[in-house]
Image: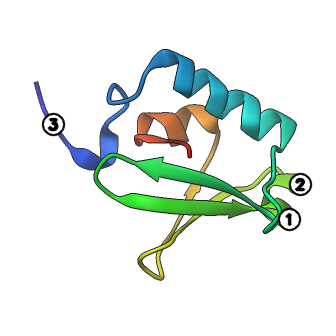
Amino acid sequence: MHSDPKHASNSWSEALRQQTRDAIECMQITPDGCLHFKHASLGFATILMDDLCQSRLLLKADTAKSTQLFDDVTGLLQAGWVID
């Protein structure tokens, strides 16, 4: 089986993956105006409320200046990101 840290869709429980879907759908924003995510090997990231309101899943890494744009929640989950 191929193990790519950027595509670690099975590293989190189904319950946590469902919580991620629910949090994005309900826009469960923290006081800093972001939804926070974690990845088993890539660290932490956020999506801004403004992006969620525009149905844009633009993930911004906390440790780097990089961003990732996902077409949908399924793509975000398949890449190994879940709600933190």
Question: Are the residues flagged by discs 2 and 1 in contact, CB closer than 8 Å?
Answer: yes
How far apart are the two marked residues, 3 and 1, measured between alpha carbons? 34 Å
**How many circles with numbers are drawn on the protein?**
3
Q: Is residue 72 above or below residue 62?
A: above
Which quarter shows the N terminus? top left
Quick one: label 2 or label 3, which is nearer the N terminus?
Answer: 3
Which of 66/36 is in front?
36
Reading the image, the residue beneath label 2 is 53
How far apart are the two marked residues, 2 and 3, measured between alpha carbons? 34 Å
Q: Residue furthest bottom?
A: 65
For badge 3, the amino acid type reads: Ser
Identify the secondary structure beneath mark 3.
loop
For badge 2, the amino acid type reads: Cys
Across and down, in percent, residue 2 comes to 13, 32
Residue shown at 81% from the left, 52% from the top = 29
Left or right of residue 37, residue 26 in this image: right
Which of 37/76 is in front?
37
Question: Are the residues flagged by discs 3 and 1 in contact, CB closer than 8 Å?
Answer: no
Q: Residue furthest top?
A: 14
Identify the secondary structure beneath mark 2.
helix
Across and down, in percent, residue 6 comes to 31, 49
How far apart are the two marked residues, 2 and 1, measured between alpha carbons? 5 Å
Q: Quadrant of residue 80?
A: top left
Q: Quadrant of residue 7?
A: top left
Residue shown at 78% from the left, 56% from the top = 30
Quick one: label 3 or label 1, which is nearer the N terminus?
Answer: 3
Reading the image, the residue beneath label 3 is 3
Residue shown at 40% from the left, 28% from the top = 12
Residue shown at 42% from the left, 76% from the top = 63
Reading the image, the residue beneath label 1 is 50
